[in-house]
C-alpha cells in the first residue's frame, strides 16, 4: 500500500513538473513569436522608409539631369557649356555626397531598430532563465 501511495505521489509530482514545464514552454514560444513579429514589422517599415528615400533621391537626380540638359541646349558657346558642366558636376557631387550620407544613416538606423527587439528579447530570456 505504501508503494501505491509513493507511486501516486511520484506520479502527481511528475505531472506537476510536466504541467509547469509545458506552461513555461508555451510562454517562451508565445514570447518568441511576438519577438519575431515585432522584428519583422520593424524591419519591413525600415526597408520601406529606405526605399522611399532612395526613390526620392532618384527623382531629385533625374530632375537635375533634365534641368542640366535644358541648360546645355540653350548654351550659346563652348565656354558656356563648359561652365554649365563644371557647375552641374560640382553641384551633383555635393548632392550625391549628402544623399549617400543620409542613406547610410538611414540604413544604420534601420539595422539598429531591427536588431533591438531581438537583442532585448534575448537579454530578457536569459535574465528570466537565471
Image: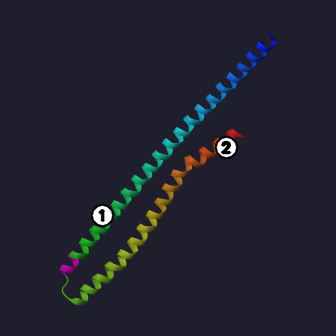
x then y, percent, for residue 109: 50, 57
Residue for point 47% across, 48% down = 42
For the N terminus, give its image quadrant.
top right
Magenta segment:
70-74
Q: In this view, does 80 lie to the left or right of 39?
A: left
Badge 2 marks a residue whose secondary structure is helix
For the C terminus, give its image quadrant.
top right
Q: Does 71 appear in magenta?
A: yes
Camera-side residue: 14 or 74? 14
**Mark 2 lies on residue:** 126
Badge 1 marks a residue whose secondary structure is helix
Q: Is residue 130 left or right of residue 121?
A: right
Disc 1 crowd rating (10 Å Cα; few below 14, some 14-19, many 20+) is few
**Mark 1 lies on residue:** 59
x then y, percent, for residue 85: 29, 82
x then y, percent, for residue 50: 41, 57
**Disc nearer the start of the sequence (2/1):** 1
Question: Seen from this angle, which residue lies furthest right?
Answer: 2
Q: Using the numbered discs, state the Cα–Cα distance from disc 2 to disc 1 in whole angstroms.
A: 47 Å
- Does 91 appear above or below 52? below
Q: In this view, does 21 lie to the left or right of 37?
A: right
Residue for point 79% across, 14% down = 3
* Mark seen at residue 99: none
x then y, percent, for residue 121: 59, 44
Residue for point 35% across, 74% down = 92
Q: How many marks?
A: 2
Mark nearer the viewer, 2 or 1: 2
Q: Does 52 appear in magenta?
A: no
Camera-side residue: 19 or 69? 19
Disc 2 crowd rating (10 Å Cα; few below 14, some 14-19, many 20+) is few
- Does 10 appear above or below 117? above
Amino acid at each position: 500500500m505504501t508503494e501505491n501511495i509513493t507511486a501516486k505521489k511520484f506520479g502527481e509530482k511528475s505531472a506537476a513538473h510536466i504541467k509547469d514545464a509545458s506552461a513555461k514552454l508555451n510562454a517562451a514560444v508565445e514570447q518568441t513569436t511576438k519577438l519575431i513579429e515585432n522584428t519583422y514589422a520593424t524591419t519591413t517599415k525600415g526597408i520601406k522608409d529606405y526605399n522611399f528615400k532612395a526613390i526620392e533621391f532618384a527623382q531629385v537626380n533625374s530632375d537635375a539631369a533634365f534641368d542640366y540638359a535644358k541648360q546645355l541646349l540653350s548654351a550659346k558657346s563652348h565656354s558656356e557649356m563648359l561652365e554649365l558642366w563644371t557647375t552641374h558636376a560640382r553641384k551633383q557631387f555635393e548632392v550625391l555626397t549628402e544623399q549617400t550620407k543620409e542613406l547610410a544613416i538611414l540604413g544604420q538606423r534601420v539595422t539598429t531598430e531591427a536588431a533591438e527587439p531581438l537583442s532585448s528579447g534575448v537579454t530578457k530570456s536569459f535574465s528570466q532563465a537565471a
